[in-house]
Image (cartoon, rainbow, N blue to C red):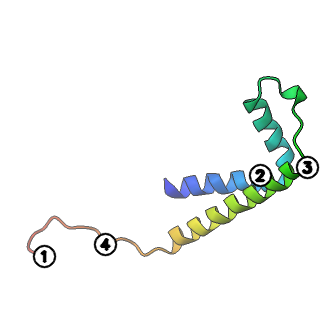
Amino acid sequence: MRAALLLAVGLVGLIQTLAPGPVIRAWTRLVYRDAAGAEPREWAYVAARVEGAALALVSLVGLFRLATAPDPVPATDDPTE
């Protein structure tokens, strides 16, 4: 479950890094009642790319840690061990 969530976050970050325009337009339509009059500033695209890169990086680090973590020792219910 955790790996799937990290993978989804990484994919969203990758999409946001590579194509910030559609992501910003989608959020603008979602947030504003009349999105036709809303125009993002130039730095919004740079900020979206930085945020997307950060999400992708955090996701990759999380997936790497998850993949290299040692397997947990299974607990036994046998009191004689």
Q: Amino acid at mark 3?
A: Glu
Residue at the image position 16 percent from the left and 64 percent from the top: 77
**Please, what secondary structure does the residue beneath circle 3 have?**
loop
Residue 80 spot, x, y in % from top left: 8, 74
Residue contact at pointers 3 and 2, CB within 8 angstroms: no
Q: From this view, report whether residue 49 is shown above or below residue 61.
A: above
**Alpha carbon distance from label 3 to label 1:** 65 Å
Callout 2: 10 Å neighbours few (<14), some, many (20+)? some
Q: Amino acid at mark 1?
A: Glu
- Lower sequence index among marks 3 and 1: 3
- Lower sequence index among marks 2 and 1: 2
- Lower sequence index among marks 4 and 1: 4
- Lower sequence index among marks 4 and 3: 3
Residue 41 spot, x, y in % from top left: 89, 45
| Residue 64 falls left or right of residue 49 | left
Q: Nearer the viewer, mark 2 or mark 1?
A: 2
Identify the residue position indicated by label 1 in the image: 81
- Residue 73's tag is 4
- Lower sequence index among marks 3 and 2: 2
Residue at the image position 62 percent from the left and 62 percent from the top: 59
Identify the residue position indicated by label 3 in the image: 42
Q: Nearer the viewer, mark 4 or mark 2?
A: 2
**Please, what secondary structure does the residue beneath circle 2 have?**
helix
Q: Amino acid at mark 2?
A: Ile
Identify the residue position indicated by label 2 in the image: 15
**Please, what secondary structure does the residue beneath circle 4 have?**
loop
Callout 4: 10 Å neighbours few (<14), some, many (20+)? few
Residue contact at pointers 4 and 3, CB within 8 angstroms: no
Foreground: 13 or 27?
Answer: 27
**Residue 24 is drawn in which quadrant?**
top right
**Alpha carbon distance from label 3 to label 2:** 19 Å
Residue at the image position 24 percent from the left and 67 percent from the top: 75
